[in-house]
Amino acid sequence: MILTQFHKKCLLYLILILFISLSATGCSKKNTENEAKTIPNAGDIIQSSGVNLNEFVRYELNETLYYKGVDGLNRYESCVRIDEILSPNIGKLYFFEGETEALSEEVSEDYSFYKAYEVTDTHYALYYDDQNEMILLKNDILEGSKWKTSMIEPDLGMLAVEATVEKIENDEITVRYKFIDNQNIPVAQQYTLEYVFKAGQGIVKEKRLYSDYELELQLTQKSSDTPNTFVSRYNKPSELISKIYPNTYFKDLISDSIFKQKMRRGHFNDNELYQSYKDYLNQLQVGNMGNISRAKEMLRNSVTYTQNPLELVRQFIAFYELNCYDYGHVWIEQLELYDNAKLEALFVFDEHKEKTRVNPQLKGEYRAVGAYFIENGMSIKYEEGHPYFSTSADFLDQAVNVVDPISKDYVAFKKRQYTVFPIQSEGYLTVSAEELAHAIKAFDADYQAHRDLKDFEEAKYLADYLFELYILPNGYFSEDYNYKDGYITEAYLESYKAYIQENPKSSYTPILINVVKILKMTANAYSQELDRYLTELGYSPMSDTFALKFMQMEMFSDITEGKKRILLNPKASEVVTVSNTEAFLSAIGPNKTIYLKPGLYEIPYQVEIENAYVQVEEGTLRIKNVENMTVLSESGIVDILADSYLEVLVYDGCENIQMEGIRLGHLRTYCIGDVLSVKASKQIEINKVILFGCGYNGLNLEDVTGLSLSNSLISDCQACGLVFKDVNQISIKNTQFYRNGRQLFDFKNALNVTLTQVVAADNDKEAYEAVNALMTADELSTISFIKSKLETTFVQKRVEGSGAVTQEE
């Protein structure tokens, strides 16, 4: 339910009464408990010439007074401490703690308070400190009696008022307190305060009289004990409560009241007002959470004195952010709030009103803690799973109430910032492509609407920052990122197209047009062309993962330049063209030529395929018992990648297989399986492929007869480039090996193996211990190298073992 204007005035009234009723802590007067006494007859208390105040006003320890106002606006206050006053007058000092409550769920602030009544044989006062108090009653009064005193008004600060006894009737006294003239009080904030005092009960009615309406609060109930929900924040706080509620309560109250008085009387111009508020913020201690709410209250006061509040709003938000960003982690540590579940339980989010408030199910000190956090603008964010306090968009709605359009736009911009950020957690984006695009558009609009104001330069910075995340590769392995396995995700590509269509005049649109155009030319892969384009714009886009791919592609281009495609097997007579993984897996079978359209073919970790020739398990694609099959790219090179720790692709029991134009590898950074494994097969022709690690070995052959590998690259594997066991008639031509294990070749019973125009360099990984040679060849192996270049920088010798290894040229 939205509060009506009248309801809001009622709420404001209670808040004002709360502040007027505040009193001091830390007095040096002796503490004692007062025994209960029978309330005397009115005639014994109110005489024709005065009031016996020590009898007229008496409270008992733990006594609780309940007040009720219009529309369910309530307050209770409990007597938590009684000090004896011995001089200069005899009496008592009664300390009260309490809370103002409102039935409206829109109220989500901390309305606890602390105050003290000083009752002596001469006067009854609201006590602030030894130099500041509001005289409520005197002992020598009659109807019409007047006296001057001071009071603390929450919006106006320290004020001089004149008290007038309006009526003395039976056991009640009515006194009105009117602002003395010439204090520069705005007309809209002028009112008369009226208290009704009753013998033995103190204040039984509080009334605020404006020119056109009245607000009233009445004592309705007294109890001899505190409420079961009572939590002491100031007198005897728990260890947790004592860490957040200050012991300088009245010192701060008086200091702020004097400052408000200065603001009210100062007749400042705007620049003087800005400087005055800046000076106030500078004297507040950064790192004290409670000072955020003090700065908030002073902002509310200050903006009433200017038509141009933007600078004040900016100063407050800067102070708020400084505290949250610098101390959000520290406060969690200080309060020892490590239990994420308990911390999250402090708040609930009202989806209907889109607002965070204290969990109504909370009781005791955690309810008080939750209210205090919301009062000071704390929201809970997480970094690597650990909570910290940060800025809250909801809080700005409470803290900043301005009508100036520019200031409202600035607050809306900051609220958006608090809502959007942080957008990364543990290195991962936490927003979708659509959300990212919306935020870019909104921040850019904030800047464009006020680009002549320095206050909105941050909006441009944020828009640029988010746009970088939007178009630069910010993840290679996660589906939630814009590039998955090196290819733009459908969500981001569609988002780019939508942004172009919806925002033709945006400064970012021409960039997105070119990005989409380049992606189209490269089958949506992040390419060197796109990388160069983004670099020319001043971005730094390239990640290590893409750098490795680009290096592979450059080497592969040199290897394959001018090389022809394979001659297709005429027995592979059925021609099929596929464009996705599912279609590819379904098409695998004998007597087929399968063309792969450019793009990514990712082998799933586990999937059921209705194809007797295919098995996918733990990310490994196993092709079994297939004859006369050719698998090749329609043009260029395509990626077949596996999210597997084991092999990427296995041919098992196959014959007359051709493969061309494929980049084959793992998605993971560590694995124990090989890239390509061929077992119990014959007549295999592989041309123009890249086999890359983290695969343990690049090409692993076992029980294979008749295999050729040509015009290819094997790189970045953990161990060997080639592992051959029980093989015959193997030909490796124009193939290069880079950045693999130091033991590059492992031959066991490898007969008639010929390696022609092979290059091996920079193979420095130590997969095996005590590697001494570039290759091992057992006594059964016959290996021939022709026109090859084998670098042995990282090993002591080329060959280990007694196999027949020959070299020509």
Image (spheres, rainbow, N blue to C red):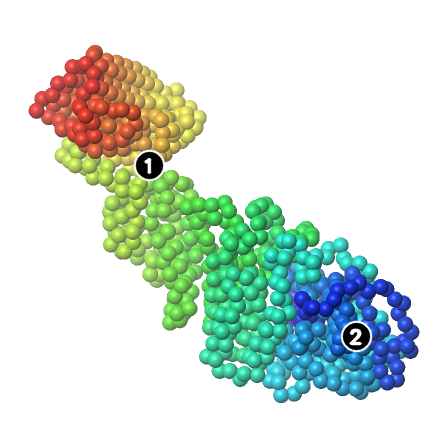
Q: Is residue 715 above or below residue 330?
A: above
Tell which of 770 and 468 is nearer to you: 770
Residue 288 seen in the figure: yes
Q: Residue at x 39, y 69 (%)?
A: 454
Q: Is residue 192 above or below residue 22?
A: below
Secondary structure type for disc 2: loop
Q: What residue type is labelled 2?
A: Ile
Q: Position of residue 442 (x, y in %)?
A: 43, 60
Secondary structure type for disc 1: strand
Q: Residue at x 72, y 68 (%)?
A: 29
- Label 1 crowd (10 A; few <14 / some 14-19 / many >=20): many
Q: Where is residue 510 in the image (x, y as percent from the top left)?
A: 30, 57
Quadrant of residue 547 within the rendered picture: top left
Residue 68 seen in the figure: no
Q: Which mark is residue 586?
A: none
Q: Residue at x 40, y 41 (%)?
A: 478
Left or right: residue 344 versus residue 532 is right
Residue placed under numbered mark 2 in the picture:
90
Task: State how far apart marks 2 and 1 are (Cα).
Answer: 90 Å
Q: Residue at x 20, y 35 (%)?
A: 556
Tell which of 367 and 641 is nearer to you: 367
Residue placed under numbered mark 1 in the picture:
600
Closer to the chain start, of discs 2 and 1, is: 2
Query: Mark 2 against mark 1, which lies toward the viewer?
Result: 2
Quadrant of residue 561 within the rendered picture: top left
